[in-house]
Amino acid sequence: MAFNEEPTVANESVGDAKGKADILNNEAGLLAQRGEFERAVALLEESLAIRESIGDAKGKAATLGNIAWLLEKRGEDERAIALLEESLAIEESIGDVKGKAVTLNNIAWLHEKRGESERAIALLEESLTIEESIGDEKSKADTLNNLAGLLSQRGEKERAIALLEESITIEESIGDAEGKADTLNNLAGLLAQRGEFERAIALLEESLTIEESIGDTIGKLTTLNNLAGLLDQRGEFERAVALLKETLAIRESIGDVKGKAATLHAIAVILMTNRDGEEAIKLWSQSLKICEEIGDNQLKQDILSVMRQIIEVSSMSEEDYI
């Protein structure tokens, strides 16, 4: 799911009401980015009232989708599904097939969260049919990715791989470099699960090249982490650590403090596994210090849990680590 922003045009006529609704929508999006969900929902409800008063059905459907997105963030999945189904009914009534396909994807995702994979797959297949009928190749590629993820969870790896390969073909044909890089990552993950590490690594390296060429820093971080994980599994610990240190430098450069703490932890685990306990302890100490500074208790507990497991099989005391 994603928040839908509206283009705003200053107007002094009837359209001024729609313009106000659009502005409220976009202001809600900014509040949501800051985590102010309550205020964001209030603005969207005000926007919704305006759209209903002027008969802006398409805008109403989009606003319902945005409210649903915020409710999902608050864990209110049932209410979110109800709003999306209302949005879907509107889109069907006005013939907004592209909007319907997007909403079907969003509902499918919420059903997936609830473990209702059959229902989610049916909705994605319906969305896919619409996207094919209107020639929306970008959305089709995205839906193929989503469908592949669900099929993979059900153990249908072969079908999932075929869908991801189809998605890559589409992304190449429309020049969607970022989408292709993401799909290569997904495909690499499935191949790695089948033990095809060489192919998986090759795909991740291809993804990395794309991300570097388009300046996709976040995507590059994901790929470097995935590549490091595969190399670690193959016993190439030094290369894995080198890649994680590269991600560490990137996270420091963009001010991702939480990501830095998690990466320090990941490097420490690899080092400890390879009997470099002294360096691992230093990195864990740095990571724990960051957790304290930013108040990330979950990561702190994860780190301490791993450290205690190591303590159980070593002669060191917890004080030696902390």
Image (cartoon, rainbow, N blue to C red):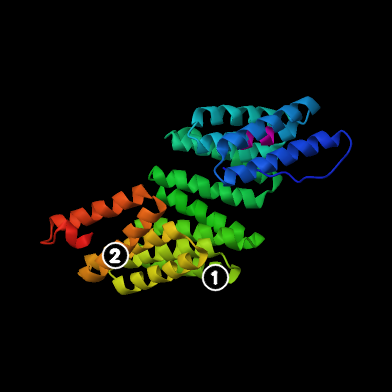
Viewer-nearest residue: 1 or 248: 248
**Spot occupied by residue 195 in the image (x, y as percentages of width and height):** 33, 60
Give the number of the mark in front: 1 or 2: 2
Left or right relative to 28: residue 56: right
| Picture quadrant where residue 192 is located | bottom left
**Spot occupied by residue 89 in the image (x, y as percentages of width and height):** 66, 27
User: Is 138 located above or below residue 92 in the figure?
Assistant: below
- Which label is found at residue 268? 2
**Spot occupied by residue 161 in the image (x, y as percentages of width and height):** 46, 54
Viewer-nearest residue: 176 or 158: 176
User: Is 89 located above or below residue 296 in the figure?
Assistant: above
* Of callouts 1 and 2, the N-terminal one: 1
In the rendered structure, does residue 152 fall within the stretch colored magenta?
A: no
**Spot occupied by residue 64 in the image (x, y as percentages of width and height):** 64, 32
Which residue: 58% across, 47% down? 33
Where the C terminus falls, by quadrant?
A: bottom left
Amino acid under label 2?
Ala
Using the rendered image of the protein, determine whether residue 200 is visible from the camera's viewpoint.
no
Indicate the secondary structure of the residue bearing disc 1. helix
Which residue: 34% across, 59% down? 289
Which residue: 26% across, 70% down? 279
Viewer-nearest residue: 52 or 318: 318
> Dot 1, how many residues are within 10 Å of its Cα: few (below 14), some (14-19), or many (20+)?
few
Residue furthest out toward the left: 315
Left or right relative to 157: residue 21: right
Report the magenta stretch's main SS.
Answer: helix
Label 1 belongs to which residue?
A: 212
Amino acid under label 1?
Glu
Which residue: 75% across, 46% down? 7
Using the rendered image of the protein, determine whether residue 270 is visible from the camera's viewpoint.
yes
Q: Give the range drawn in magenta.
A: 61-66
